[in-house]
Amino acid sequence: MSSRILRPTPHVPRNMYAMLFDSIHGQDQALATLRQALASNRLAHAYLFIGPTGVGKKTTALALMRALLCRERPQEGCGICSACASVTAGTHPDMAMVAPEVGKRSISIDQVRELQRILSLRPVLGGKKIAVVDDAHLLTPQAQSALLKLVEEPSGDALLMLLTVNAATLSRPLLSRCQQVRFSLLASEVVEAQLLRDYDKDAATAHALALHSRGSLGRAVTLDPELFTEERKYVEEELHKLPSASFSELSRFAEWLVADRVKKSKAQVEAGEERPTGNRLELVLSWYEEVLRCVVLGREGIVRHQENAAVMSQRAAALGVEGALRQLTLVYDTIQALGRNANRQLAVEDLLLQLARE
């Protein structure tokens, strides 16, 4: 089929084959909705999972797939039988996972038509045909119209799950025909515990990554600990001397902030794989969030940059609530502008100049 089958990434927990509902943490409300539907045998024919990136939407979709396709423990999933293993591998004949094709930023009508064809077929092994559309907010208007027909006239043995970070781009008719399940940001304690338990992180690394995860386990997992620590320290140093920096120094810092961040290991180079390490501007955002917290809560509000508590306290005293909020808004607005294809270098240079003037 023309759509891309999503396979597990190399960064998976040790107990992936046991990752059923009981091992999904921090999403109690979402899981309660699905468990109740399973127990009463009243699953909707279409679900819309809404929530930030990396908080468990896809993991939950796969767990629901295993629960429905497992032969050993129907309605629960055993995690180890051939059916559960093939769901994990993305090879089960009764499942399909659709996302933007490589190099494209949208899901096309042709992909949805192929999905319609697959879901119209009778199940091969399980009792259902199940499809997941990842990044559903990237469906083109034409693809949404085609998908709406599929949702309006569902097959009795078909289940569709749409995963999105933002439902605002989806049409109202499509939204009204899907049962919405909301996923929330994860508490840093939940992220830290899972990094320790499932990803072999040491305690110090897990704690640091969790604090900077912004409630996303997926974000924490993709951060390279060594590189992240190094870059965080550099950002803190540059922001510390920002008020006295020359324009050439600001320009050089801006160039570094907007540079592509991809670190490749030797094995990844040979396999043609790249591992993104995150957005450097998020480190700047984190700094100014902490300054505002320090203004409001005092030093107790400094959580992610405790080594710089003295500097932050001085900045907080000088800025006050209004000034700290203004600086944080400048950073946030710049990040939003970059998402709208603003000139990256100029936008960040302007940001640093405004922050320096403050």
Image (tube, rainbow, N blue to C red):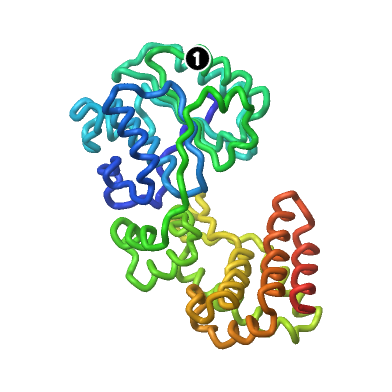
Residue 217 image point, x, y percent: 43, 55
Q: Is residue 271 left or right of residue 310?
A: left
Q: Secondary structure at mark 1?
A: helix
Q: Residue at x 53, y 80 (%)?
A: 298
Frontmost residue, 262 versus 18: 18
Q: Which quadrant of the figure has residue 64? A: top left
Count up the numbered dots.
1
Q: Which quadrant of the figure has residue 77? A: top left
Residue 355 image point, x, y percent: 74, 74
Q: Is residue 16 left or right of residue 305?
A: left
Frontmost residue, 149 versus 221: 149
Amino acid type of the residue that numbered disc 1 sits on in the rendered structure? Arg
Q: Which quadrant of the figure has residue 187? A: bottom left
Residue 252 image point, x, y percent: 74, 74
Q: Residue at x 51, y 55 (%)?
A: 275
Outermost residue toward the left in this view: 72
| Quadrant position of the C terminus in the picture | bottom right
Residue 256 image point, x, y percent: 68, 69
**Figure check: 125 above or below 243:** above
Q: Residue at x 47, y 64 (%)?
A: 224
Q: Residues within 10 Å of mark 1 (few under 14, many from 20)?
A: few
Residue at which label 1 appears: 117
